Amino acid sequence: MEVKILSAKFHIDNANTLAVAISHGAYSTLDKLFAMQPAEVIEEVKKSGLRGRGGAGFPAGMKWGFLPKNTGKPVYLAVNSDESEPATFKDRYILVKDPHMLIEGIIICSYAIDCHDAYIYIRGEYTTQVKILQAAIDEAYAAGYLGASIAGRDFKLDVTIHRGAGAYICGEETALLESIEGQKGQPRSKPPFPAVAGLYGCPTIINNVQTIASLPFIITNGADAYKAHGTEKSPGTHLFGISGHVEKPGMYELPLGLPILEVIDKMAGGVWKGRKLKGIIPGGSSTPVLLPEEAKDVTLDYESMAAHKTMFGSGGIVVLDETVDIVQLVENLISFYHHESCGQCTPCREGLGWMLKIVQKILRGEGVIEDVLLLRELCDNIEMKTVCVLSAACTMPVRSYLDKFRQEFLAYVPTASPAAQEKQE
Amino acid sequence: MADKIKLFVNGVEVEVEAGKNLIDAIGAVGIEIPHFCYHPALGSDGNCRMCLVGIEDGRPPLVPACKTPAQAGMKVLLDAAHIKKIQHDVMELELINHPIDCPICDQAGECKLQDFYMSYDKQPSRMTVAQVKKGKKLDYGCGIVHDQERCVLCARCVRFCRQITKTGELGIVNRSDAAQVEFFPGRPINNRYAQNIVDLCPVGAMTSADFRFKQRVWFLKRAKGICHGCAKGCNITIEHNREKYQEDRIYRFLPRLNPQVNGYFICDKGRYSYHKENEGRLTVARQGSQVRNQADALAACNQEISRSPKIAMILSPNCSLEEMVAVKSLAEKLGATLSGFSDGYISAGDGDGYLIQDDKSANRAGLGILGINSNRAVFEKDLGEAQLLVNFNNDLTRSYTEPELRALLKDTKMILAASHDDGLAAMAAIAIPIAAASEYSGSLVNCDNILQSFTKAVSKNHDPVDIGTLAAQLGSPLQTRAEQFSELRKYLSVLKNFEADTLPAEGLKLTDNEATHVTA
């Protein structure tokens, strides 16, 4: 099932160092790259169907095409490595195991969009990853792959690591830009979109680490080679981080479109200890949960997930076995999003705290049916009224748990009045 | 005149000004879009989410009106059920952690949270869990008291300090519902416009130590005024009240919008200048140390004037144009010299290039327009030759020390028309009380050559006259305000189309020709 495109060098010792990376093909794309026109590069990426791997799945080449022409302003690239979504741990592998693949991808993207200053915004807690990535960047500078003349070509590119200070919201693209600019990490209202007015008010492309790291393969082997994997609308491979109650948790590179239950069984060894499957979080904590019976038809691609009213997200699959207390899980989930809400806009700032206290009240056995109903209503009242989608990242999954596991919440409600029960029915 | 465009609000076509956001454009035709964070002076921020509206043109289902420019043909939805529900939902979220202490909150009566609750929510609380508790009655500097619990995090205060004063004292620290407005430890608010933060705060989170709990706002009467604190002539609202058996008192000055003069703001010094309107007033006429009634005092003045061969007159640069022209006519009739000398009203280096001016007088430009000499040497020469100085509220102690003044006056008697009972009044042979700036009507020319009028706001128990009326009582040919205004037209042709008290609200910009004599 596995396909080694992004993870081709993960098993090689010291592949994070330049010498080893080069001996295994790193930077070999550059001759071909600089023989192409930037527009040809963009076209090739469009043709590959590569979609943004940060979660939203927006076509990468199309995003690059949104850059306005001849503004007289510099164009920036911001690589989003603020990998903070619970259950998501794919980018860290690239950063540690094959940082030169990322740097090569940055060169490709920068050439395509005429960028000469790229930033890697990295999660502050990734201390090891920062050290390894910075060492690789330093090596790349020393070898002439970065700097004033990349690989001897008339193309200048500087790459700067910007460490976050530990805020989930800084993974949101405009909050990320605010943070790089030295402001408090809070999202900007869109429009304007970053492609038009991003970093320092200049046209800016923001892509996830995995998206950028996919580029060397596409340029080296061509779009068709990339499209040979995956589905028509979701081509290529993806790094899936499988965690939770499975026998073999880990990170697996797979083509898109595989059945999710088959992947859990064959790659991750199935539900641990022979227990029964209770649910699957398909793409990180912000994605609505799938029941086992729903999961039977679900394949690991954007379309199938959307058809089942959930999301592909970051590819962070979490398996829940029968022992999981869904109400406790929801409390944990809301607690995270409440803690990480930047506090900028009212519904998220006030609403998530209220939701947290309600679920905690239910867990204490002090809740009533109205609290369960209110919790469900608040999901609707908060969602999509905000500047960004952080609160939606909480309310969408919580709604799914409330709808699909309603009885578990009601079981915590000790004194359900007949009237209230009637109301909830 | 700005271009007009037509768009639809709830299906009804309205004509609005082009180039404005939906809140301002539609608000100008009387349709309210509720909002907390947006303020025209600070721009949009989009954090409160109270102004979400629907636009029926294929764009996202909800947009913040503060960030959405009005466009021709746009179909704006405000009364749809889903928009009403959003307004209700946002209001509910604003209120869950907000203390419902309206009966004791100093902002009661002018709280947007309260207003919007009545307009857009009106539902009982569903909050059955503990509220977030934050700080209360915190000293934020410059006389600002902050109650964090009441704050809706609209960030107007933060943006004011960043965008307007550029001092940046405030920021929002912490995340989620622990977010709160704070200053850097040990560095509270420290700017000369800080009290505007209180005005900007849409709820009771930022209050003024000077005003808190002094009055309920619905008891206050409001009148339009012009600040006399400096030559800028900022537009203000004078809020005053006469308690039963008490004197009519001013409780606060608030900024009044005039885009041509001061925008939305005033400085703190000007704001606090209302204290002087209330305090230290000269309320009875005196001859020497003897209290006299007004008629007797006037008679004594006339007697002094009639027996003085040479009279010098001086008036305050705060006098209105009407007062100045009345005094000028009186001086001409009596053959007296007239000076507008007032160097002491200038505080060199105090101006900031924004609103605060070096010149602390309200109508120095008027002296120039009327050709009233303000030269120090000329005044001193005239004074040296006179037996009587008639002083119309010029605070000479600003320009001279007391010994200097006594030496200048020597045997010259001084009749003083004064609003305040200060050291100068004690030196006068006759002192007559006159109205302070809030107690009469008139017009002024500011440092930018903008002619503005103001009207009487406060009626004191002792009912002091203004200088124009006093000049008439002392024999000025200009006996009424209408006559004074008519005389002014000789100096200011721009007035030919206006009557007293009918000047445009935003003032009249004088032509270069009319302002030729301005010496400020």
Image (spheres, rainbow, N blue to C red):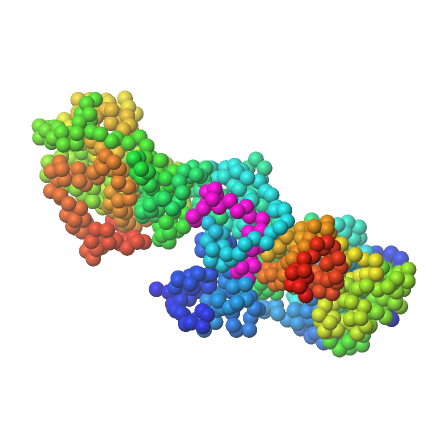
The answer, for residue A85, to whether it is visible in the render is: no
Q: Position of residue A139 (x, y in %)?
A: 79, 55
The answer to whether B140 appears left or right of A333 in the picture is left
Magenta segment includes A127: no
State whether residue B38 is above or below residue B274.
below
Q: Position of residue A22 (x, y in %)?
A: 84, 62
Quick one: A47 or A320, which is closer to the camera? A320
State whether residue A282 is above or below residue B285.
below
The answer, for residue B475, to whether it is visible in the render is: yes
Q: Where does the N terminus of chain B fall, quadrant-wise?
A: bottom left
Quarter residue B254 falls in: top left
Quick one: B174 or A256, which is closer to the camera? B174
Query: At 66% across and 67% down in the image, what residue appears?
Result: A113
Residue at the limit of the structure toward the front, as seen here: A418
Q: Position of residue B275 (x, y in %)?
A: 35, 35
Query: At 71% across and 65% down in the image, what residue appears?
Result: A403
Query: At 86% across and 70% down in the image, what residue appears?
Result: A262
Quarter residue B25 falls in: bottom left
Magenta segment includes B95: yes
Q: Position of residue A194 (x, y in %)?
A: 61, 63
Query: At 47% across and 44% down in the image, what residue appears?
Result: B103
Quarter residue B518 falls in: top left
What segment is highlighted magenta in the picture? B86-110
